[in-house]
Image: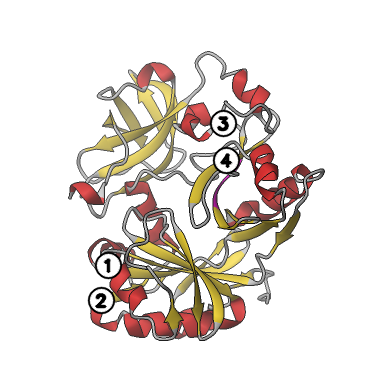
């Protein structure tokens, strides 16, 4: 369904309007950016739980005896060996070894995989997978328009999802991180995954779009006694930044290789052949920018595209930044010259003409297990 300015509407659009959400254009979708306040929603996820509509994400299925081998060729990691019920983060590279998209792959069966790509890269990912799967005994299906995705994230997520009336799932409490289970909601198939993009415990539920409203309402009822709050994309961005999770179009792009963005571990160079292998082997040019985390004092935060300087010379660029709601001080991702990437290095962020000192720190900025 489309609105007048050609933005796509989520299957949950009516819910968002009932709740009085503010909307934004996100990758061609009219999506809720907030319902109440960015801070309230952010803190709800850190202290109780938040519910998100992620139906703009892309869902691409590969099925058949050759599906695993096709993914091994198409992606940077090895997917054919992950067990049923597991998920794995991976990268879609181009021939030069640069990043077309980052995605999560779930193994749903012996011959069935679900690839979840970013909304803005839906067609890039679908077309690349379709082309790269040629010659393998499998079928590639882009089901993005048929699938809705609801996430419940936060310390109370398990209690809430366990209490959803009509949701039938075995072994939810024992489900590990980056694992998934088949389930049903009022007889409709659901995939329940213990994954997320917030740095908190949580679940993501994939269901046919026609049943998304009913599932959201049931989750909301289950969350009433657990302080569940509807959350928009604004707090999702600050949550993922605190958790040190990159965002495509900011920290990841076709101008960057995995080694530049702390993602070299995602690439399995033991594979004989995959798209982008030669580009990865070629390495990066001398002086190529690398991704770092920056921490500042005070309240003035660096934002995307702000210059990072040293002794008045520009040595990098902020890719994402905010005053951390959880930590209380400014944090940022930045791409900087490699000579300035060592932990403890002090640089400056040009915040509207003022040089704000910032220190290179290890990632993530926030770890729920350390709190």
Q: Which mark is residue 91?
A: 4
* Distance between mark 1 and mark 3 Cα atoms: 34 Å
Verify CB contact (< 8 Å) between mark 3 and mark 2. no
Q: What stretch of residues is rendered in magenta?
A: 100-105
* Distance between mark 3 and mark 2 Cα atoms: 40 Å
Q: Is residue 101 magenta?
A: yes
For the point 44% across and 79% down, the residue is 168
* Distance between mark 2 and mark 4 Cα atoms: 36 Å
Counting residues from the N terminus, which is met first, the one under dot 2 or under dot 4?
4
Classed neighbour count for the residue bearing mark 4: other residues with Cα under 10 Å, few (<14), some (14–19), many (≥20):
many
Classed neighbour count for the residue bearing mark 2: other residues with Cα under 10 Å, few (<14), some (14–19), many (≥20):
some
Q: Which residue is mark 3?
A: 256
Q: x, y percentage for residue 84?
A: 53, 55
For the point 47% across and 81% down, the residue is 215
For the point 28% across and 73% down, the residue is 159
Counting residues from the N terminus, which is met first, the one under dot 3 or under dot 2?
2
Q: Nearer the viewer, mark 3 or mark 2?
A: 2
Local secondary structure at mark 1? helix
Residue 30, by quadrant, is bottom right
Residue 354, by quadrant, is top left
């Amino acid at each position: 369904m489309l609105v007048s300015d050609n933005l796509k509407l989520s299957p949950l659009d009516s819910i968002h309007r009932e709740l009085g959400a503010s909307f934004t254009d996100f990758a061609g979708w009219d999506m809720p950016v907030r319902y109440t306040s960015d801070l309230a929603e952010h803190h709800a996820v850190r202290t109780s739980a938040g519910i998100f509509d992620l139906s703009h994400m892309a869902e691409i299925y590969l099925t058949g005896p050759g599906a695993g081998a096709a993914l091994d060729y198409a992606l940077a990691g090895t997917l054919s060996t992950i067990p049923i019920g597991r998920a794995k983060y991976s990268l879609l590279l181009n021939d030069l070894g640069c990043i077309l998209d980052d995605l999560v792959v779930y193994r749903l069966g012996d011959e069935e995989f679900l690839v979840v790509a970013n909304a803005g890269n839906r067609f890039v990912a679908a077309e690349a997978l379709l082309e790269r799967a040629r010659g393998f005994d499998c079928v590639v299906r882009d089901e993005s328009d048929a699938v809705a995705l609801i996430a419940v994230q936060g310390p109370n997520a398990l209690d809430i999802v366990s209490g959803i009336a009509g949701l039938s799932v075995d072994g939810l409490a024992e489900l590990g991180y980056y694992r998934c289970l088949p389930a049903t909601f009022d007889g409709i198939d659901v995939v329940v995954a213990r994954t997320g993009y917030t740095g908190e415990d949580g679940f993501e539920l994939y269901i046919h779009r026609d049943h998304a409203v009913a599932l959201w309402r049931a989750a909301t009822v289950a969350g009433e006694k657990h302080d569940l709050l509807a959350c928009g994309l604004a707090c999702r961005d600050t949550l993922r930044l605190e958790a040190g999770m990159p965002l495509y179009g900011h920290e990841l792009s076709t101008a960057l290789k995995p080694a530049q963005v702390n993602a070299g571990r995602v690439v399995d160079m033991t594979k004989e052949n995959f798209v982008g292998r030669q580009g990865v082997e070629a390495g990066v040019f001398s002086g190529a920018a690398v991704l770092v985390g920056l921490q500042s004092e005070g309240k003035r935060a660096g934002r995307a595209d702000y210059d990072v300087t040293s002794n008045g010379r520009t040595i990098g660029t902020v890719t994402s930044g905010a005053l951390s709601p959880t930590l209380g001080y400014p944090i940022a991702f930045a791409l900087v010259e490699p000579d300035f990437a060592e932990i403890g290095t002090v640089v400056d962020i040009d915040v509207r003409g003022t040089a704000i000192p910032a220190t290179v720190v290890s990632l993530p900025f926030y770890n729920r297990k350390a709190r």
